[in-house]
Amino acid sequence: MNANYTFAAGSKILVLPGKKITINSNYRLRLFETQVFSCSSTWSGFYVNAGGTLFVTDGSVIQDAGNAIEPQANGKVIVSNSTLLENIVGINAVNGNFPHFFLYNTFEGNSTSSAL
């Protein structure tokens, strides 16, 4: 992404298999009561590059992804009151790139809840 964007409450985002959504430096993506999924097979997930920010809040659902959320070094992730559903990995926070704010979330049906 090369723009700031907020999905409206109730949005449903269908992602093609194998595709990923990348939040680039200096940009923010906000999911508010939003469902992100793939119909036929696994999509890659959200990648948050250094300086990018991903907000997943208020009943949002990320499902059917390889790595639902993968923050890169200095990528900011805020996840609250949301669900990571039927992903291979819920949060892939490698090399200590942990989410900045992570509270009251549900992991359900994921092969692995997190890779830290």
Image: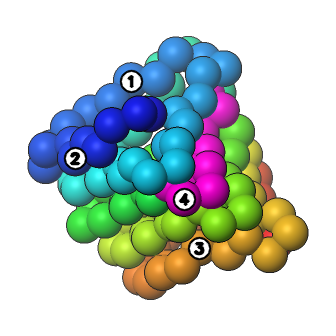
Dividing the picture into quadrants, the one containing residue 42 is top right
Give the residue type at disc 1. Answer: Leu
Identify the magenta region.
43-52
Earlier sequence position, callout 1 versus callout 3: 1
- Residue drawn 58% across the image and 51% down it: 48
Labelled disc at residue 6: 2
Earlier sequence position, callout 4 versus callout 3: 4
- How packed mark 2 is, by other alpha carbons closer than 10 Å (few <14, some 14-19, many 20 or more), is few
- The chief SS type of the magenta part is loop
Earlier sequence position, callout 2 versus callout 1: 2
Q: Nearer the viewer, mark 1 or mark 3?
A: 3
Give the residue type at disc 2. Answer: Thr
Q: Is residue 42 magenta?
A: no
Earlier sequence position, callout 2 versus callout 3: 2
Q: Nearer the viewer, mark 4 or mark 2?
A: 4
**Is 49 left, or right, of 14 in this rendering?**
right
Residue, disc 1:
14
Q: Gap between marks 1 and 3, in whole Å?
A: 24 Å
Residue, disc 3:
99
Earlier sequence position, callout 1 versus callout 4: 1
Give above or below for 36 relative to 40. below
